[in-house]
């Protein structure tokens, strides 16, 4: 965590900026957001990428690092910035400049030009998919604590709503229909959901537990990151659950609300939370499936009311 920034303080920044979102144009909101993030993380440069554009929609440059660049040099920076942003929009995984192809050369270039040896791209995700990225260029090492990651995920929801509203086909851009109270309600409910998932992870000694929308959209996760893409896994789980329950219905099992898959190394248990949500657990203890099933069913019943509140509070 960078000096001067307290873990979780990014929430306050999001709330303060979002409170103004209904009163300012979309472009102004984006610029205020990126300037605020640059200041919060003491970044030399910070950029926001949204949608399919290869160039940043807003750039924070508090120390004027970009101003001395000529056209050729600026184009080179924009190319590096686009590469970093695109690398996380593909699978939603945070990356550093060194993770890119030619990473060492890129890091050396950034160090020589901006004195920023550390560069990061954070995916902006909503509905289980990455739709944009925030890029940071810093003199300091990895600045994100766990609370910051969750706070930046909340920014993803805000910007998704803002971008959807601003790019409508029915005339001029409108103000962003999001309030800090609504964002706060969403985050508080998501934290309650997270506690239930944490308990289930502990009780079952599972590797991963995930709450998904029944359409395959990622909502929340606890445990280890798999070697698979979270978005792809969620989509497969949802489609597999729908197919299995439909097949069960054909053969008379009309009340089927859960599906189990057993592999050589791991088991997957999926249970319906409501008609719009699925709880998925990945575990490797083949000797305790009954306990895993019981605890997962208990967690699913507790999640019903929280998921309803979550969908009502969501900024999407």
Image: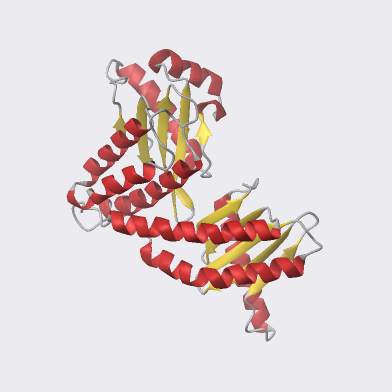
| Residue 38 position in % (x across, y down) | 34, 31
Name the residue nearer the viewer: 70 or 154. 154
Q: Position of residue 107 (x, y in %)?
A: 49, 20
> Above or below — where is 86 with respect to 197?
above
Please give the count of numbered marks on the rendered protein.
0
Comparing 219 with 108, the one in front is: 219
Instruction: Identify the residue at image location x=70%, y=69%.
Output: 293
Q: Quadrant of residue 110?
A: top left
Along the viewing direction, whichever of 13 and 214 lies nearer the viewer: 13
> Does residue 210 appear anywhere in the picture?
no
Q: Quadrant of residue 209?
A: bottom right
Farthest top residue in view: 112
Q: Quadrant of the C terminus?
A: bottom left
Looking at the picture, how far across and down is residue 36, in whole percent? 30, 36
Way the structure is coloured? secondary structure
Q: Residue at x 69, y 60 (%)?
A: 204
Q: Residue at x 41, y 68 (%)?
A: 309
Q: Is residue 111 left or right of residue 231?
A: left
Percent x, y for residue 181? 30, 57
- Residue 219 visible in the displayed image: yes
Residue 206 in the image: above or below residue 101? below
Closer to us: 76 or 193: 193
- Left or right of 21 in this view: 289: right
What residue do we see at 50% from left, 27% from top? Answer: 97
Above or below — where is 301 with respect to 97? below
């Amino acid at each position: 965590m960078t000096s001067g920034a307290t873990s979780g303080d990014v929430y306050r920044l999001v709330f303060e900026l979002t409170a103004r979102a209904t009163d300012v144009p979309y472009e102004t909101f984006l610029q205020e957001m990126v300037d605020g993030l640059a200041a919060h993380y003491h970044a030399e440069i910070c950029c926001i990428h949204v949608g399919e554009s290869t160039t940043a929609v807003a750039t924070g440059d508090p120390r004027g690092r970009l101003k001395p660049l000529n056209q050729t040099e600026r184009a080179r920076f924009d190319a590096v910035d686009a590469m970093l942003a695109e690398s996380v929009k593909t699978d939603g995984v945070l990356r550093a400049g060194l993770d890119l192809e030619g990473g060492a050369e890129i890091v050396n270039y950034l160090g020589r030009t901006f004195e920023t040896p550390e560069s990061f791209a954070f995916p902006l995700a909503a509905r289980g998919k990455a739709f944009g990225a925030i890029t940071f260029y810093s003199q300091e090492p990895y600045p994100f604590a766990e609370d910051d990651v969750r706070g930046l995920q909340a920014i993803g929801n805000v910007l998704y709503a803002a971008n959807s509203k601003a790019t409508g086909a029915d005339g001029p851009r409108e103000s962003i229909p999001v309030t800090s109270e609504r964002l706060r309600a969403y985050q508080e409910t998501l934290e309650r959901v997270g506690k239930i998932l944490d308990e289930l992870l502990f009780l079952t000694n599972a590797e991963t537990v995930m709450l998904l929308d029944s359409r395959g959209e990622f909502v929340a996760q606890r445990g280890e990151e798999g070697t698979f893409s979270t978005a792809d896994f969620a989509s497969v789980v949802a489609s597999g659950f729908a197919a299995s329950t439909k097949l069960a219905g054909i053969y008379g099992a009309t009340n089927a609300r859960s599906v189990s898959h057993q592999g050589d190394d791991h088991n997957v248990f999926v249970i319906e939370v409501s008609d719009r949500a699925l709880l998925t657990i990945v575990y490797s203890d083949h000797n305790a499936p009954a306990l895993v099933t019981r605890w997962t069913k208990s967690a699913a019943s507790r999640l019903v009311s929280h998921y309803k509140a979550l969908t009502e509070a969501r900024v999407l």
